[in-house]
Image (cartoon, rainbow, N blue to C red):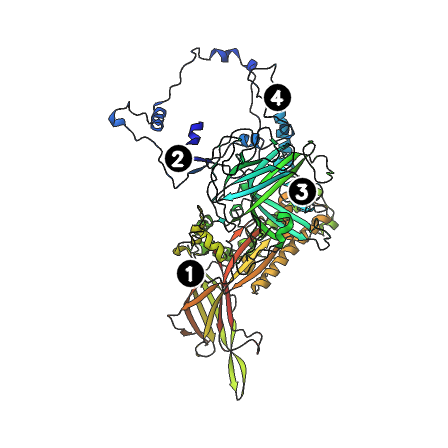
């Protein structure tokens, strides 16, 4: 592509790579020395030289179309030429991924590349006497040997990932409880552990494990703008209320200044968009600012680099088409555009680099080792990173008047009432980092570095927090087309019906347990254990999956497991007593629609386009806030049944709704999708309250895992990585339930009266169908996050319908609530 093509503002722009979390070392190509070619092969080479290339007719026709040179053709052969059209309202983007070789050459630095000096004249091809290079010249065979060696290291690393583990000690690289001294030590948090596997040996592969410097004269500032920040133009900064969704672009710039009085050399500068799951464990014995947390676990699920904004060797065009003369002055703020090629920051000079990112619709497949669709969809921002801004994030409190909380800093995280775990956060950040070699005279280390292998340090870094809310269109479409067997084609509700009827979560758990048992059996057979040791193997599950699975219902309904007793008052003289008047059950049709994402009023007003003065320039959030009416859940179909000994009409009733939130978290990746059957289907097949059911189920699978782990420890058995990860994920699994009241204003459309029929047992059955209409009020500024699941954290929703019959109160009989409750799974997004 020519430079002129890049400068045309009407041309299509190039989009940066979505993510490069890993790199692969490919095997070297097979090279054949020239001397090894046979003379017969030379004889077959055509003797004609310098024959001009002539394209085929089809190729020439395409060339003519693109170039517009069709005048030589006959009128009957004239075709429409391609041309560009001017537009001032839209910028076109293409997702164009550079090759891994390009990414490797720009960012994947090794120690040799840190010593390169780009200010010198590059070597001339063919000059073998005066050429200087940053590395020794190698023969082709030496180059092959080096590549094979690197490839062998990569293969060795893959073998390490496939090795077996026991539970005597958590293996480094797979357990989150790693040594805090040499792995990832932050200046204000000395117990950081990165719970991600490494796939390479370069600095960039392990950037989150590097130590951090305490003092650096460099100051970094990140600015996010509403529009593309062209040079020599004033920029309107984006509000902290801004939300982004799938496909949205983030534009802005980074400024860097060396506040010292002397020039400063740097090694590597990166600008990235990152997604992080982080959990913290408060240190109850904290005695100073530096030891606030006894454990911090971090998992990076997204990392996108802007190759133009980062320091690179070659010219990489900006994704938004921003062009400028390198090292020229910005006429508005006086900053120097770009960073010097010699990697030397002059004192008191402010440098500026522009960045553009696009939020992905999906994450890379390697984010989920089990390739579960739900786990490779980006999760929403949730909770607050308490370690952000040097632990100032933990001081953020909710402002009841605004409906959210924040710091008085640019790039602050936002606290909302999203019912997150107190110690967990999902954050998206723009990150800018300087990385230097510890052994360099210009690099500064922050404390004693005990491991000599740790050769690099993050000398300076900064963050800018962004709010991301995924658009679940892809998930909704998946649910609508998720039809199995002959169960009703009801779209979104069909998936929930399948989970409940076929107990998909329990099936997955049983499958994982069977894998572990087979693996243990193979180990026992191979090791030929004694009969006394075999007696310890008491791992058989008292669980019959066939009995647990119910037949598919004819109707797409969810019903109460057992009838609820209804009491009424019976007067005797002056006093009154409670008597049972009947029993009631409820059924609800699975909804084929979604509950819309909701945020505090000010955030919603800014992003939904209600306030034109605050409306963002470009965003898909407006569409997310303004769902089509046919996609939104606005009513429920409910059927009530009342049985009694007499033909007396059922008592009057009132109906209300609540939103039930089920959240889970773990420290190791779950190998299955968490379904609603885990919360509403008990493993012992006895009807229970959902909370009691979930508690029993959780304790049940934890006891199973505990038995496996104890047996493995007792017999010193090594298991595969998959088995190890599954056992640890269940061991660390935590679940909580929240109930949101008065989120909807409900109204009942009651056109039908009770219908009655007499049953064979001489009882009378009353039945009635009603429609419950739902109108969102959200008086308490609830941030209703979209439904999501990842390997480490997830969120599911149910809509609870409560039907309360009149005639009693809780004081006379604690069991006489007269309330029939039923939870129906719903999708929020």
Q: To which residue does mark 2 refer? A: 10
Identify the residue at horizontal 62%, vertical 44% (top origin): 722
Element under disc 1: loop
Give the mark toward the camera: 1 or 2.
Answer: 2
Disc nearer the start of the sequence (3/1): 3
Report the Cα–Cα distance between label 3 and label 1. 49 Å
Identify the residue at horizontal 53%, vertical 41% (top origin): 364
Neighbor class of circle 4 (other Cα within 10 Å; few <14, some 14-19, many 20+) is few
State if disc 2 and disc 4 touch (CB < 8 Å): no
Report the Cα–Cα distance between label 4 and label 2. 41 Å
Give the mark toward the camera: 1 or 4.
Answer: 4
Q: To which residue does mark 1 refer? A: 634
Neighbor class of circle 2 (other Cα within 10 Å; few <14, some 14-19, many 20+) is some
x, y percentage for residue 273?
Answer: 54, 42
x, y percentage for residue 36?
Answer: 56, 14
The image quadrant where one finds the N terminus is: top left
Quadrant of residue 547 in the image?
A: bottom right
Report the Cα–Cα distance between label 1 and label 4. 70 Å
Is residue 510 among the parts visible in the rendering?
A: no
Disc nearer the start of the sequence (2/3): 2
Residue 133 - label: 4
The foreground one among 415 and 103 is 415
Report the Cα–Cα distance between label 2 and label 3. 46 Å
State if disc 3 and disc 2 touch (CB < 8 Å): no
Element under disc 3: loop
Residue 184 - label: 3
């Amino acid at each position: 592509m020519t430079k002129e093509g890049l400068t045309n503002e009407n041309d299509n722009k190039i989009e940066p790579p979505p993510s490069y979390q890993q790199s692969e070392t490919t095997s070297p190509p097979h090279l054949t020395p020239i001397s090894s070619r046979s003379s017969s092969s030379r004889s077959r080479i055509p003797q004609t030289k310098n024959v001009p290339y002539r394209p085929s007719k089809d190729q020439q026709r395409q060339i003519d179309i693109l170039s517009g040179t069709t005048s030589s053709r006959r009128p009957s052969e004239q075709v429409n030429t391609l041309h560009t059209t001017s537009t001032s309202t839209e910028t076109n983007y293409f997702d164009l991924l550079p090759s891994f070789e390009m990414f490797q050459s720009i960012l994947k630095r090794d120690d040799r590349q840190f010593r390169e000096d780009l200010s010198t004249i590059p070597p001339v091809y063919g000059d073998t006497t005066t050429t200087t290079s940053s590395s020794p010249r190698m023969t082709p065979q030496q180059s092959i040997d080096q590549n094979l060696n690197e490839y062998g290291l990569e293969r060795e690393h893959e073998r390490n990932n496939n090795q077996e583990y026991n539970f005597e000690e958590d293996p480094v690289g797979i357990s989150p409880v790693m040594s805090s001294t040499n792995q990832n030590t932050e200046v204000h948090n000395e117990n950081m552990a990165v719970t991600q596997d490494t796939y390479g040996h370069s600095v960039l592969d392990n950037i989150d494990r590097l130590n951090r410097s305490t003092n650096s004269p460099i100051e970094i500032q990140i600015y996010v703008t509403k529009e593309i920040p062209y040079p020599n133009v004033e920029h309107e900064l984006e509000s902290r209320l801004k939300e982004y969704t799938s496909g949205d672009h983030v534009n802005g710039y980074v400024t860097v200044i060396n506040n010292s009085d002397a020039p400063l050399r740097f090694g590597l500068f990166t600008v990235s968009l990152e997604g992080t799951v982080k959990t913290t464990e408060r240190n109850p014995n904290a005695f100073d600012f530096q030891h606030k947390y006894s454990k911090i676990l971090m998992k990076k699920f997204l990392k996108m680099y802007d190759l133009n904004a980062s320091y690179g060797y070659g010219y990489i065009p900006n994704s938004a088409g921003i062009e400028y003369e390198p090292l020229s002055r910005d006429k508005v703020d006086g900053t120097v555009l770009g960073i010097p090629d010699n990697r030397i920051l002059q004192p008191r000079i402010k440098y500026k680099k522009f960045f553009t990112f696009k939020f992905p619709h999906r994450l890379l497949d390697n984010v989920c080792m089990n390739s579960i669709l739900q786990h490779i969809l980006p999760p929403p921002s949730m909770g607050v990173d308490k370690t952000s801004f040097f632990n100032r994030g933990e001081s953020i409190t909710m402002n009841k008047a605004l409906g959210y909380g924040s710091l008085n800093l640019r790039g602050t995280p936002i606290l909302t009432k999203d019912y997150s775990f107190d110690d967990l956060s999902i954050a998206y950040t723009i990150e800018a980092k300087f990385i230097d070699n510890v052994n360099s005279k210009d690099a500064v280390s922050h404390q004693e570095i005990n491991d000599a292998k740790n050769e690099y340090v993050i000398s300076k870094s900064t963050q800018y927090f962004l709010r991301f809310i995924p658009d679940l269109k892809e998930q909704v479409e998946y649910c609508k087309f998720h039809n199995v067997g002959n169960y009703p084609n009801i779209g979104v509700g069909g998936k929930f019906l399948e989970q409940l009827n076929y107990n998909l979560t329990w099936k997955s758990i049983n499958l994982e347990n069977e894998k572990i048992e087979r693996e243990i059996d193979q180990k026992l057979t191979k090791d030929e254990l004694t009969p006394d040791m075999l007696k310890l193997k008491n791992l058989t599950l008292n669980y019959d999956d066939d009995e647990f699975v119910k037949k598919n219902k004819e109707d797409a309904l969810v019903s109460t497991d057992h009838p609820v007793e209804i009491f009424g008052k019976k007067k005797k003289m002056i006093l009154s007593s409670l008597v049972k008047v009947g029993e009631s059950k409820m059924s609800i049709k699975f909804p084929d629609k979604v509950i819309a994402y909701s945020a505090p009023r000010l955030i919603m007003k800014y992003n939904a386009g209600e306030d034109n003065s605050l409306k963002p320039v470009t965003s898909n959030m407006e569409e997310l806030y303004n769902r089509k009416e046919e996609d939104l859940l606005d009513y429920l179909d409910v059927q009530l049944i009342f049985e009694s000994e007499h033909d007396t009409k059922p008592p009057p009733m009132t109906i209300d709704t609540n939103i039930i939130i089920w959240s889970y978290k773990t420290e190791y990746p779950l190998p299955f999708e968490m379904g609603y059957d885990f919360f509403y289907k008990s493993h012992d097949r006895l009807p229970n309250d959902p909370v009691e059911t979930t508690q029993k189920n959780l304790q049940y699978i934890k006891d199973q895992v505990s038995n496996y782990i104890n047996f493995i420890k007792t017999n010193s058995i090594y298991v595969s990585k998959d088995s190890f990860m599954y056992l640890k994920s269940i061991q660390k699994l935590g679940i909580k339930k929240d109930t949101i009241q008065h989120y909807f204003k409900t109204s009942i459309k009651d056109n039908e009266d009770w219908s009655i029929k007499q049953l064979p047992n001489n009882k009378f059955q009353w039945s009635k169908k009603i429609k419950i209409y739902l109108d969102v009020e959200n008086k308490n500024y609830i941030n209703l996050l979209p439904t999501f699941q990842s390997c480490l954290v997830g969120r599911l929703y149910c809509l609870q319908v409560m039907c309360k019959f009149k005639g009693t109160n809780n004081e006379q009989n604690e069991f006489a609530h007269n309330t029939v409750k039923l939870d129906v799974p719903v999708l929020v997004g």
